Amino acid sequence: MLPPSDPALADRIRACRICADRFARTETRHAPRPVAWFQPGARILIAGQAPGARVQESGQPFTDPSGDRLRDWLQMGVDTFYDRSRVAIVPMAFCFPGYDAKGADLPPPKICAETWRADVLQALGRPRLTVLVGGHAHKWHLGPQKSVTDTVCNWRSHAPALFALPHPSWRNTGWLRRNPWFERNLLPVLRQAVQKALHD
């Protein structure tokens, strides 16, 4: 384990190439480009899934419609969202995993979290608020879950220090329509927790 004060941890992650062969075999045949966006002392941890194709190009997390929706859920401006001293964005895999033969997103490679996640969480210390985005983050932080819906439905059992959210992808627009309680009941409490974590 690296000591929490190691300033080179993000640089080490950005230099990681352990999945180069794996990515070369995907339909996208892309090279690794780890997106490490955190620093010790951040007040909020956003634990996502993996960068998408647009983030692979930009080198900055959530620079896509999913990011727009997530920032709306959090009611957080762009400047705050990308302020690493306040918000750590730590996905389950730091690189875009690529697409399969049908054009679907591949899951985040487990080797990434196995290699880096414990060191990153140790370096972050104890964020005031943790936001889990998507099923992969739910399982890693909370253990085996029945489903994303069940996990999100049970949000009160973890709030206000932790919230489990569905992924903000456009693919979940139907889920949001079928579950209006998410926006009606969960989001107002989440937004209060965000403001408290940032300003108290």
Image: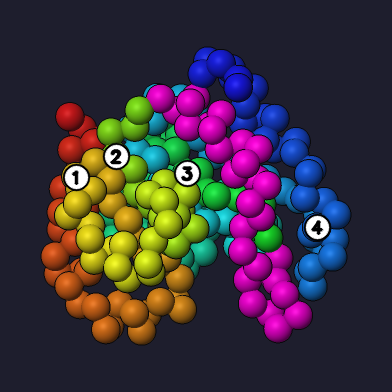
State the SS at label 2: strand
Cα–Cα span, label 1 and label 2: 8 Å
State the SS at label 1: loop
Cα–Cα span, label 3 and label 4: 24 Å
Q: Residue at x 77, y 50 (%)?
A: 19
Please report whichever mark, 3 or 2, sits nearer to the chain's N-terminal start: 3
Residue labelled with disc 4: 22
Please report whichever mark, 3 or 1, sits nearer to the chain's N-terminal start: 3
Q: Quadrant of the N terminus?
A: top right
Q: Residue at x 22, y 60 (%)?
A: 154
Left/right of residue 157 with respect to residue 110 in the rendered view: left
Mark 2 belongs to which amino acid?
Answer: Leu
- What range is drawn magenta here? 98-125
Residue labelled with disc 1: 160
Cα–Cα span, label 3 and label 1: 19 Å
Q: Quadrant of the C terminus?
A: top left
Left/right of residue 50 with respect to residue 46 in the rendered view: right
* Residue 68 place in picture, x, y as percent: 41, 63
Mark 3 belongs to which amino acid?
Answer: Ile
Left/right of residue 134 with respect to residue 10 in the rendered view: left
Q: Residue at x 28, y 46 (%)?
A: 162
Residue 96, quarter of picture: bottom right
State the SS at label 3: strand
Q: Which mark is residue 89?
A: 3
Q: How is the image coloured?
A: rainbow
In this view, the mark in front (2 or 4): 4
* Residue 18 place in picture, x, y as percent: 78, 44
